[in-house]
Image (spheres, rainbow, N blue to C red):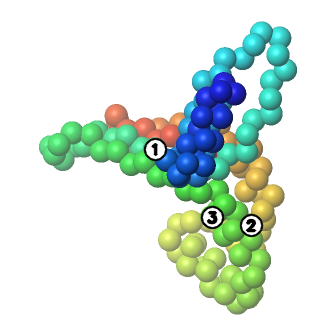
Amino acid sequence: MKEQRRQVLEMLADGKLTADEAERLIEALERERPEAPGAPSRPKARPKYLRVVMDAEDGTGGDGASRMNIRIPLQLLRAGVRLTALLPPAAVTKVNAELDKAGVPIDLAELKPQHLEDLIEHLDDMVIDLDEPGSQMRVYCE
């Protein structure tokens, strides 16, 4: 494991890999590493992305199944939550009214960074059954 990690870092230093590619390779190496029996388990790494994946059968007679795969950086969500504190109260009222009209019952005045962190901490490969047979959505952090 240490040898493989060193090789990845050398390729990064030589310019053969980007920092993002090196990070993904190292994360993959850590996931593949077998746990030694009796070894203390390491704390879970802080997730970096919120992933939403939807698979649905296409009932329109088209080319078969539809797939949606969205990866959202959690830093973007965290920044958005922090930015809501900077909105003037009149703007928050207008935004809340528009969200309510659209059927989204969220009160931006009540949204706090701790709420997002609690959600992320408790989000474990949630599966949402959609109203259509053969359709499924998964939401998880990675």
Q: What residue sits 52% from the left and 74% below the top?
A: 101
Of all residues, the one furthest to the front in this rendering is 14
Disc ID at residue 53:
1
At 80% from the left edge and 24% from the top edge, which residue is drawn? Answer: 41
Q: Amino acid at mark 2?
A: Leu
- Packing grade of label 2 (10 A; few <14, some 14-19, many >=20) is some
The residue carrying pointer 3 sits among few (fewer than 14), some (14 to 19) or many (20 or more) residues within 10 Å by Cα, namely few
In percent of width and height, residue 59 lies at 22, 43
Decide if residue 101 is in sight here: yes
Specify which label sits upstream in the sequence, 1 or 2: 1
Q: Secondary structure at mark 3?
A: helix
Q: Vertically, is 29 above or below 53?
A: above
Residue 111: mark in rendering: 2
Judged left or right of residue 59, residue 99 is right
Q: Secondary structure at mark 2?
A: loop
Residue at 34% across, 35% down: 133
Residue type of the residue flagged with mark 3: Leu
Tell me how far mark 3 sits from mark 1, CA to CA.
Answer: 19 Å
